[in-house]
Amino acid sequence: MLRLTDCSNVLLREPGRTNVSYGLVGEKAFGKVGRVAVNISLVLSQIGFCCSYLIFVEKNIGEVILAAFGIQRTTASSSLTLIMLQILLYTPLSWVRRIEYFALTNLFADLLILFGIVYIISYTVQTLDDAPVGSATWENFNSTSWAMLLGTAVYCFEGIGLVLPIYDAMDDDIKHKFPRILSYTMVFLVTLFSVFAGLVYAAFGQETQSVVTLNLPSAQDSVATMSVQLTYSLALVFTYPLMLYPVVKILEGYLFPHHSQKGYWRWEKNGFRFALVCLTAAIAYFGKEELDNFVALIGGFCSVPLAFIYPCLFHSKLVDEGKTLNNIVIALGVFTMIFATYQAVSTWN
């Protein structure tokens, strides 16, 4: 990610240049091919993130409805209904045109997620404390699908497409602090993800669910579980438009290069954004039963190039330093992308 900001700083030195996108960095490094490669990966990965949010919300809200109203979610139509209802929430949010407007809602979403993380960690610690000696169901090494870990781990860093937009949105007098802030944030997140995943697997072993909130006590028996499922779902509702934002900006640049002569261009864009939301809902519906494979596929095929391969390729071309490290990261990235993608596809039921 820091490789991208280095490239951005180089391009910002050009006369008249005020902002830099990921696609522009790719174009300056490798021409039109570089921009197209970046845009394809960004569009696919961000759509994948949005789809996983829809699936997560559908599964959690289904549990809440069961607990609150006693309505069983046993048919495909109920899942379809919950996914389609989310379209009503996400469509107006997708019409927001400036990324700065998501600042407060994203902060609120982070607080909601923090509440959920604290509760889940406390519950897993209590589960470990109460577990009888010798009752663990851990598997030290999963030889069947271990490579899915690679794609899933990279998927966790799903904000790669937002690094440069956030960097550009910062005031010029604090931009110099961005690399340090980003580095501290990444270290914190890696630590948090590792501790969280370790505790959850230690507590639930091979019973660990793809959606970890489903490992909590039933929402029918626990108000705390219901609260966590609701807050997590609300957090993802607020985060969804931020994840869709790069897709919208890229595709609208191709579809609406100029304003309509009749002045209807805003409604044309709104219609297109509504269609994008519907597309993510359709993909989510058909991929909801294989969430772990779906996440690993998005992480391996789309996120690995964006997070590891492209930044180092562009950095070597534009900055002309650190090529040895860049080449090592590129080689590891290509291996991870191929292997994780193959594993996710080959184990898909």
Image (tube, helix red, strand yellow):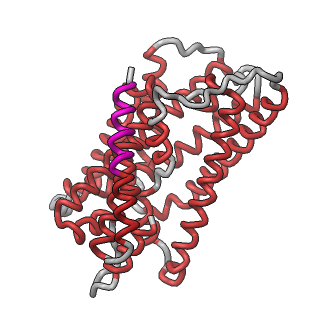
Q: Is residue 96 above or below residue 220?
A: below
Q: Residue 44: image x %, image y %?
A: 32, 45
* Quarter occupied by the C terminus: top left
Q: Indicate yes or no whether the magenta region holds residue 304.
A: no
| Along the line of sight, the residue nearer the viewer: 201 or 112 | 201
The secondary structure that most of the magenta stretch takes on is helix
Tell me if I can see residue 90 in this picture: no
Residue at point 27%, 87% (across, down): 15
Q: Is residue 167 above or below residue 103?
A: below
Q: Quadrant of residue 218?
A: top right
Q: Extreme bottom residue here?
A: 15
**Number of disc labels:** 0
Q: Indicate yes or no whether the magenta region holds residue 342.
A: yes
Residue at point 81%, 25% (across, down): 131
Q: Residue 215: image x %, image y %?
A: 66, 26
Q: Which residues are magenta?
A: 334-347
The reply, left or right, for residue 238 in relation to residue 134 is left
The reply, left or right, for residue 183 in relation to residue 327 is right
Q: Quadrant of residue 91?
A: top left
| Along the line of sight, the residue nearer the viewer: 204 or 32 | 204
| Along the line of sight, the residue nearer the viewer: 21 or 320 | 320
Q: Residue 216: image x %, image y %?
A: 70, 28
Residue at point 27%, 68% (across, down): 24
* Quarter occupied by the N terminus: bottom left
Tell me if I can see residue 116 in this picture: yes
Q: Residue 79: image x %, image y %?
A: 47, 21
Residue at point 50%, 45% (across, down): 153
